[in-house]
Amino acid sequence: MLRIGLIGTGTVGGGVIQILEQKIAEYKEKLGVELELSCICAKSEEEVAPYKAKGYKVSTNADEMIAGDDIDVLVELAGGYNMPRKWILAALESGKHVVTANKALLAKYGHEIFPLAAKKGLHVLFEAAVGGGIPIIRSVQEGFVGSTVESLSCIINGTCNYILSRMAEEGLDFDVVLKDAQKLGFAEADPTFDIEGIDSAHKTALLASLCSGKRVDFEKIHVTGISKITAQDIAFAKELGCCVKLLGIYHRDGDRVDARVHPCFVPNTNLLSNVNGVINAVYLKCDNLGETVQTGAGAGRLPTASAVVADLVSLARSTDQGSRKALPMGWFNVENSATLVPISETSARYYLRFTSRDACGVLAKITKILADNNISIETIIQKNVNDPGKVSIVVITEKTLDSKLSKAVDAVNSLSEIVEKSQVIRFLA
Ligand SMILES: NC(=O)C1=CN([C@@H]2O[C@H](COP(=O)(O)OP(=O)(O)OC[C@H]3O[C@@H](n4cnc5c(N)ncnc54)[C@H](OP(=O)(O)O)[C@@H]3O)[C@@H](O)[C@H]2O)C=CC1
Ligand SMILES: N[C@@H](CC=O)C(=O)O
């Protein structure tokens, strides 16, 4: 019997209760696994009242629930940093396993949490923290261990993918679609985590750590979000046979790790281009296995709760069945911090969009600056924009080193005709 103490009855926590109510009897009958929702903890009496009315033991004091003897596993679904960090460390200290969907916490404090769990012989499971309902953590920890993951590119923020898809398909404004994503329970409590790419960086750090076997600090990951992507960029992408996606990227580069998050022009021939709405996808290249892709709902109440419940069943099976030893705990050495490839050393084909006054000779000046910096141009287009007196100049470069590109873009930006900071988006290789 695995006795569960749950903190947080919001989007995901509420979903976990719903699924457990549906499936607890089935787990016992079909899998021989016994789960019990032993205590539900929320902030106020008002929030716990409906669960109390159903006969659950409830609490408004997480510390007390964790310190008590009534639970075997803490399920942390409150979100945030400070309280969850304290709760999880306290749970491990007092011999309880942990299941959480809190990628922000694990990316920031995993180096404290995983070693403590290992020292205590306990499990910290976090399937729901990356890719919502997709079992990508278990795949990387277990299913792919016959191979080494050489690289991955992934859509791992449902909110951003939902926003970009609806902007492209329905021509809607960024802010309108973001509000819908919040209403649907996809967005983080602070949606800047989503739209500025921070949530994707948390998840990329976790995946890159698991794939490289070293600790990849999310603070060191280059991050650009989608808040500066305009309807014009999306229209140009369409014209060029692409769509815009926010991607998490990981490559093994000798002893170093190339891990980054930024928007990409994804050609319509690439399978990631067909991943729309809240759907996430993780595309991996492995040495022995070859290429593989996992896709499914990346956020939302029931898909995310489904991954949390899967962790609970897995935990119950591993703790009930002595023969199945420990579940993987981390699979990366938190002491061994990975050296990251600086973004300046990476290369790509680039889409550059400059907004200029409609003046003679700007195109020639831009072309000269790029040529002086040894940047080869594939295409250059000038277009009128709705704003009279202004033009957009779009340049597609051949594969170029980031440091070389940045220098040239700075030089273009300093031209007196340029009226807005330029847009720079990479093409997915
Ligand atoms: N939503 C999603 O699709 C996904 C979310 N996640 C992660 O799951 C976690 C939960 O997210 P989500 O369910 O969306 O968030 P919600 O805001 O919907 O739910 C969080 C719940 O925790 C409660 N809570 C906060 N502090 C305490 C406390 N001290 N004691 C008891 N309860 C508390 C909140 O209460 P109150 O509202 O009163 O503050 C709220 O009910 C986060 O870490 C998030 O990043 C991961 C994958 C997908
Ligand atoms: N805010 C996140 C929730 C799941 O991790 C997202 O939109 O993907």
Image (spheres, rainbow, N blue to C red):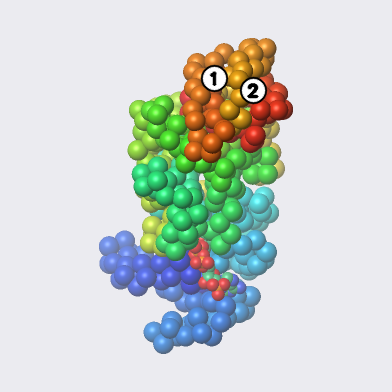
Identify the secondary structure beneath mark 1.
strand
- The residue closer to the viewer here, 81 or 406, is 406
Quadrant of the rendered image containing residue 336: top right
- Whether pointer 1 and pointer 2 mark residues with C-beta atoms closer than 8 Å, the reply is yes
Rendered view: 185 above or below 339: below
| Residue drawn at 64 percent across, 22 percent down | 405
Residue 235 visible from this viewpoint: yes
Find disc 2 in the rendering and name its residue.
Answer: 405
Find disc 1 in the rendering and name its residue.
Answer: 397
Left or right, 151 with respect to 422, comes to left
Left or right, 280 with respect to 366, comes to left
Residue 227 horizontal/vertical position (percent): 56, 46
| Residue drawn at 35 percent across, 38 percent down | 274
Give the alpha-carbon distance from disc 1 to disc 2, as whole Å: 9 Å
Residue 427 visible from this viewpoint: no
Residue 52 horizontal/vertical position (percent): 45, 85
Residue 142 horizontal/vertical position (percent): 44, 43
- The residue closer to the viewer here, 254 or 283, is 283
Identify the secondary structure beneath mark 2.
helix
Left or right, 375 with respect to 145, comes to right
Rendered view: 199 above or below 371: below
Rendered view: 311 above or below 252: below
| Residue drawn at 40 percent across, 42 percent down | 168
